[in-house]
Image: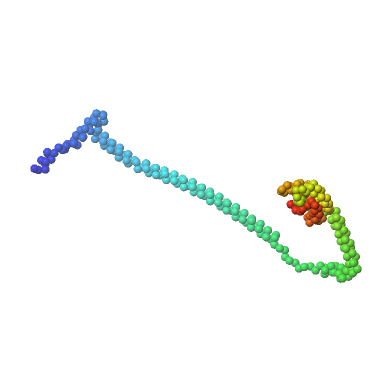
Amino acid sequence: MSGLQALAQEMIWFDKSRYDEAERCFYEGTNGIPQTPQVKTAQQGNKGHSRSQKPPDRKSSQNASKSEDQSELVSRLKCVELDNENLHNVVDDLRSMLLKLESRMAVLENSQAPAPKTAPVNKKSKVEEHNGVDDDDDIDLFGSDEEDEEAERIKAERVKEYSARKAKKPVLIAKSSILLDVKPWDDETDMGKLERCVRSVQLDGLLWGASKLVPVGYGIKKLQINCVVEDDKVGTDILEEEITQFEDYVQSVDIAAFNKI
């Protein structure tokens, strides 16, 4: 069996292109769009013309973008030139200010420079030349005693005035506040009599103050009494000795508080 016979038995559509062309013509006829070879050529010509016109449009857009870029560069260059000019002006101003400061500093340094030292002038020789005599001739050998006496008198008057002012000035007297605890022998001691005995102690620079009875224990009470003394005249030892003399009532004397006034 040959190959052609085998192909003849196959179900192949050899005329499909013809049928496709016929179908296309049918639909074009129904839609009212006649297709002729002239129309096709015109369409193809239009397509070729449009294709030939596209490249100039691209070139024109490129030229327009280039011109815009050039204008932008020109504006930027102008801005840079202006900034450069402003910077030059600022530098010139700073240079002038620096020159002024240098000139002022030079003036100040010259004004503060020490004056040149000059040789000491011999005043004695000038006076001698002016008077024409020696200074030894002007010394008064007998006037020194009178000057010493006058100085001593002035000194004595000043000392006297100082002493008088010091005597008039009030002297600050140092005083102290003392709180005493006076303890009796037992609970049968008359505390009123004990307080009267304590207050009977009278010394120069001693002033008695308030008092109270403070319980100690087992019914015994102690006398707590305050007094103000002058430190230069009355001491705590003297107070204790004077109060403990009342042996019938007083057992002991203690200092509860001592404060400077």
Q: Residue at x 82, y 68 (%)?
A: 124
From the top left corner, tell me how far across and down residue 249 is, in percent: 79, 51
Would you identify the image quadrant in which residue 171 lies? bottom right
How far across and down, in percent of the image, does residue 237 sit?
78, 56
Query: Which residue is nearer to you in this view: 25 or 246?
Result: 246
Residue occupying image coordinates x 83% and y 52%: 202
Q: Which image quadrant: the N terminus?
A: top left
Name above or below for residue 109 compared with residue 197. below
Q: Position of residue 165 (x, y in %)?
A: 85, 55
The residue at the point 60 percent across, 53 percent down is 94
Q: Is residue 65 above or below residue 115?
A: above
Between 155 and 187, the one lying in front of the other is 187
> How many discs appear?
0
Residue lying furthest front in this view?
Answer: 188
210 relative to 47, above or below? below
Q: Is residue 230 in view from this perspective?
A: no
Is 136 on the left-hand or right-hand side of 14?
right
Colouring used for the render: rainbow
* Residue 123 appears in the figure: yes
Nearer to the camera, 156 or 213:
213
Name the residue rendered at 41%, 43% in the picture: 64
Whole-percent x and y of residue 138?
Answer: 88, 68
* Image quarter of residue 10: top left
Question: In the drawing, does residue 69 fall left or right of residue 166?
Answer: left
